[in-house]
Amino acid sequence: MPSFSMKAFTLLLASTLETLILGGMLSGLHAQSGTLKLTSAAFQDQGTIPTRYTCDGQDISPALSWTGAPGGTKSFALIMDDPDARPNTWVHWVLYDLPANANALPENVPKKEELASGARNGVNGEPKIGYEGPCPPPGPEHLYHFRLYALSAKLGLKPGATKSEIEKAMKGRILGEAQLRGRYGRRQ
């Protein structure tokens, strides 16, 4: 059996997941326990986000996966932000209308308005479409929040919606929420 490095294995896994998820081939594979949990193979909760996913690296989104979607879930929404940014929380990524049968996102989700699955990217703080990796000023680490919401309906917003538009549209539709936090800092 050939020997693979962890990096090669991770890239192969991410590519396979991207093919399955964006192609809509994963169907009903998430658990229906009702306890939504969000994880990443790239970092543990409150662990350091690898440079690869930041402005100091490739600035690509990390692979994410989730389990425990509540019954009645019709779509998912994801918001990544930095509440440590000053003067206001900085929005790094909003993604919504993810299909109910999705249970993961591959590394490097395309930065385009609509994905093959029908999911839509909103605008980040720049404002640009798609993921914008951590890029804090030199100094203390910032704690970045990835929040996944299981929703009772698709939001139906046009591509390019803002975080506040998504939060408003989600009111009364949230069936479950999961959070993953990651740290990143830059030396002075």
Image (cartoon, rainbow, N blue to C red):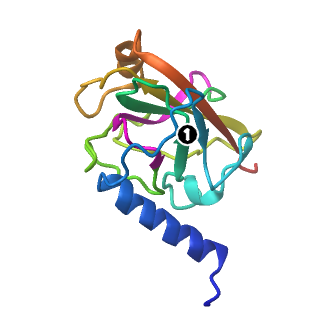
The stretch in magenta equals 86-104
In the image, taking residue 116 as reference, residue 95 lies left or right, namely right
Quadrant in which residue 1 is drawn? bottom right
Camera-nearest residue between 58 and 68? 68
Give amino acid for label 1.
Thr
* Magenta span contains residue 42: no
What is the x, y in percent for residue 28? 40, 43
Given the current orientation, which residue lies at the most extreme bottom position?
1
Q: To which residue does mark 1 refer?
A: 67
The x and y percentages for residue 182 are 67, 42
47 left or right of 71 in image: right
Count of labels in the image: 1
Magenta stretch encompasses residue 91: yes
- Residue visible at 45% across and 27% down? 150
Apparent side of residue 176 relative to residue 73 in the rendered image (left or right): right
Quarter occupied by residue 15: bottom left
> Which residue is outermost to the top?
172
